[in-house]
Amino acid sequence: MQTALTAPASGPSNAPAVLTGAAIAAVCLIAMVAAMLGSTFLLGLAAIVLGTIVLRVPVIGIMIYLVTFLFTYPEALRGVGNLTINNALGMILLPLMLVGFVREGSLWILRFKPMVLIGVGVAILVGSSVFYVPSDDAAADMAQMQIERSQRVQGPALIQTRDAGTKLVTRYAFLMFFVFFVRTPRDLKLVVGTILACLLMSYLNATAEVGPIRAAEGRVRVLGEVGSGLYSGRNPNKLAYFLLFCLTLLWYMRTRIKSAALYIPWLAGFALTFYMIPLTASRSGLLNLMLFCGIVLLEGRFNYRKVVGLAMVTIFIALQFGYQVNLLNYILPGDVGARLTNIDIRPEVIEEGVIAQGSAQGRQQTAAVAARMVPRHPFFGVGIGNFNFERAIVDPTGTLGPPHNSYLWAVTQGGLVTLGVYLAMFTYVFRSLRELERNYEARFREVDLGWLVRAMRTGMFGFLFFSLFADMWHHILFFVVIGMSLAVINVHRSYAETGRLYGAPVPTRNLAHGLAG
């Protein structure tokens, strides 16, 4: 049963959408003024108005979540302790979801296989962390120091949400909200628009470590310390993946462009995003970009454009690696080209006590350490957040740092069981997307999201490949990518079962037929 409380507004009129957009713009303006003036009254007024909008259109809450997760924001908007924007949104969306379950008469999301698998993985990771006890005094001291640092950062709070386990649980809750409230093609398009709007903000906030023109030299980053900067941009590798995900959405979105005039801004955005990926000087990002190019060149019908594209890629690879001509130095600024082709680099300190081992030697060392950790905790791992504590015990070099590999992250912190659970989830998602892609026009013409199905399929390839080089499966980008994939699958599954889109009115003819029967 669909209700006004849980179903998106429907109808031919665009007036509700226009009014909602105007209201959100007004709230943002009020919040910005309040942040500048430090006005508690204005902030409270903005919160009340925004809460009312979310109650009416819950998908707006998901869009706000995306922005707050992907971006930092001014100090005045961050709240204190557990009183934060995201927690307030959760207090609104959780009752709405529970009421929706009651009115629909089904706890379908708790039987949705990928949600169950991820939930099992989260439970194992958190449970193992609770019962993990460092067998070394130094590791125990490190664990206590991390707890104290987390408490200092967050301040007084009933629940320490800075804890790795609690953070993972709250992100799983976000995933549940995402899948439950993003139920229609319009909702998915709003989500895509929000992500691309964040991409636009990353253009505006892009900077570099050095260089008079900011992006003239050095690695492109996005400011995230003082607000309005892309959160993942603090790490160039994560920024490269975010850009690649947006590039994937832009590429497949081109098939929905109806006006020739819109190709100009689309081409500008696509080209700029494409160029920013190697500018991050992320080698894993560049490899992922090459994978993306290979996928889009090989899919679909073979034509002259693909022949030209494959020839250009072949010539580039032959000159770059066969003749040892560093073409990247000619098309990229400063030291970026040299860094992309230099495998043996020094470790880079990201923050106090955390070293990013970018070299192949460092990654081999981490893999060897992980191989020694797995037999000590084979089935359920050491628990989320405890990798460095266990590494301090088994690594003779005394080097600390994250696994930089999601598969190693899963098997060391969640054991072989968690690794198997995550791989089963990815297999289900990928197979479901491929199944939707087959004969899409004949089966799902009314849904009209074939471009997004193809985008998420290619995006899943890229995500699994990038997971070889980064700890992605607990990062917010994992929950965004998986949330979008599951929402796409759920929208089409619902249409296949009912013959209509979620929230759409039951056709009068069908209703009359049902009453007569």
Image (cartoon, helix red, strand yellow):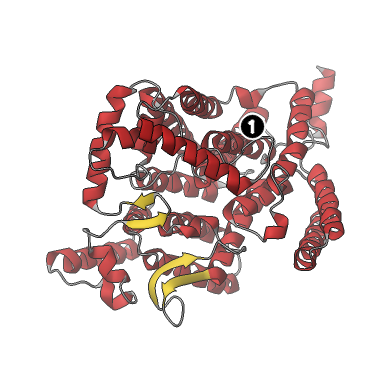
- Quarter of the view holding residue 489: top right
Residue identifier under label 1: 494
Q: Residue at x 68, y 59 (%)?
A: 75
Pick the quarter of the image with the C terminus: top right
Residue 22 rendering spot, x and y as whole percentages: 81, 62
Q: Position of residue 133 (x, y in %)?
A: 42, 25
Is residue 408 in view?
A: yes
Q: Which residue shows up at 80% across the image and 59% down it?
A: 27
Q: How many marks?
A: 1
Closest to the observer: 135 or 448?
135
Check disc 1: other Cα within 10 Å, few if <14, some if 14-19, many if 20+.
some
Q: Is residue 94 above or below residue 41?
A: above
What's the residue type where badge 1 is placed? Answer: Ser
Residue 354 coordinates in the image, percent (x, y): 39, 49
Looking at the figure, which quarter contains the N terminus?
top right
Assign a secondary structure to mark 1.
Answer: helix
Percent across and percent down for residue 270 are: 48, 66
Regarding residue 293, the answer to whether it shows in the image is no
Residue at image coords 25%, 69%? 338
- Residue 114 falls left or right of residue 409: right
Name above or below for residue 187 compared with residue 378. Answer: below
| Closest to the observer, 225 or 324 | 225
Image-quadrant location for residue 95:
top right
Q: Residue furthest bottom?
A: 212
Looking at the image, the residue that sits furthest to the left is: 323
Image check: 476 left or right of 375?
right
